[in-house]
Image (cartoon, rainbow, N blue to C red):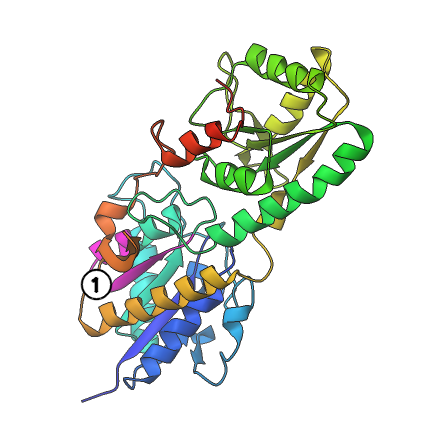
Amino acid sequence: MPSQRLGILTAGGDCAGLNAVIRGIVCAAAQHGVEVLGFPEGYEGLVNPSAARPLTPANTRGIELLGGTILGSTNKGRFQLRRGSGGGGGLSDSLLRVARQAFEHNRIDALVILGGDGSLRTALQLSRAGLRCIGVPKTIDNDIESTDVTFGFDTAVARVAESVTTLRTTADSHRRALIVEVMGRNSGWLALHGGVAGGADVILIPEIPFDSDLLVRFLKDAERRGARSLLIVVAEGARAKAGRQIRRQTSTGDSRLGGIGNYVESLIVARGGRETRCCVLGHLQRGGAPTAFDRVLGQQFGVHALELFREGMFGRMVSYRFGAVTDVALADAVNRSRHVSPTSQILRHARALGVFLGD
């Protein structure tokens, strides 16, 4: 019987824990004589199939400790599907042909895709075209509905919490209000967990449009009570009740969420609030070494992806539900965003801690 061969690629934005997943797949594959090939630069690696390289326990030793991805990634490639493009269509016949040729050229039996919603929808397209694919969810936003947590989220939360805690000292020194704008797209998980962990006074998330009058009143009341500083964590997708989400143009001409932190700063100053500064964390949330939790979870995800491969269970996505690593159908995982519920326990606990949530 010919040896089995598995391909891996990392697509979309980077995050901590990607290398841990790669390491988990490679080590588990070696136990069963499965060869592993890594495609560089996300789905674009399929365009140049000769660039794929063997991954072994020896040449991946220690990578679970590293941030980023040793394979490289991109969220600008020809294969990338955007949110809202639906479950069918999307990839052209020529791109599907390119993918098939990459499978054939490298003699891989299946491909494991590590990516977020857009990358996993591309995986679903490939799967529906008859190519054997397995998805592993990756996003610091923690906004994929079919999994309770994604690797990279815990590390990003730690970055946010550390930043908020660090900024408290300079805010106290100058009796300022400091605003920390964080990522998360249309979900508030990162802002909520990072803000609570960092001891923020205010947390504004997309799921709760904030009342500007109540926000200003809360800040002035806190100042009257003698608070030397105020820390405000705001998710990039947050908005005022009477307003829209704020977007900005990137250097590549794309329109992305961003700028709400500066809006809140202007609002506070215009309404007679204390001196205020805004800090946008940006890609600091994505980089750096993964936390121990993300190293463990990433490697567990990798092992389970290899188990799905050996069992012939394709068109599936690795998932973490109710404290255990499991899997769901790719078709049931994509296009379903996970948001903070109004009845969420973490929201209730944040209110009990005295955190103002905009309403």
* Residue 283 shows in this picture: no
Above or below: residue 268 compared with residue 259: above
Q: Horizontal and vertical percent for residue 315?
A: 22, 58
Q: Is residue 89 left or right of residue 244?
A: left
Q: Amino acid at mark 1?
A: Phe
Above or below: residue 278 compared with residue 221: below
Residue named by callout 1: 314
Closer to us: 273 or 351:
351
Q: Horizontal and vertical percent for residue 2?
A: 22, 88
What's drawn in magenta, residue-wise? Answer: 124-138
Could you say whether the residue bearing mark 1 is in a helix, strand or loop? loop
In the image, farthest residue toward the right: 174
Closer to us: 346 or 191:
346
Residue at figure coordinates x 21%, y 54% from the top left: 128
Q: Horizontal and vertical percent for residue 178?
A: 70, 31
In the image, farthest residue toward the front: 225
- Image quadrant occupied by the N terminus: bottom left
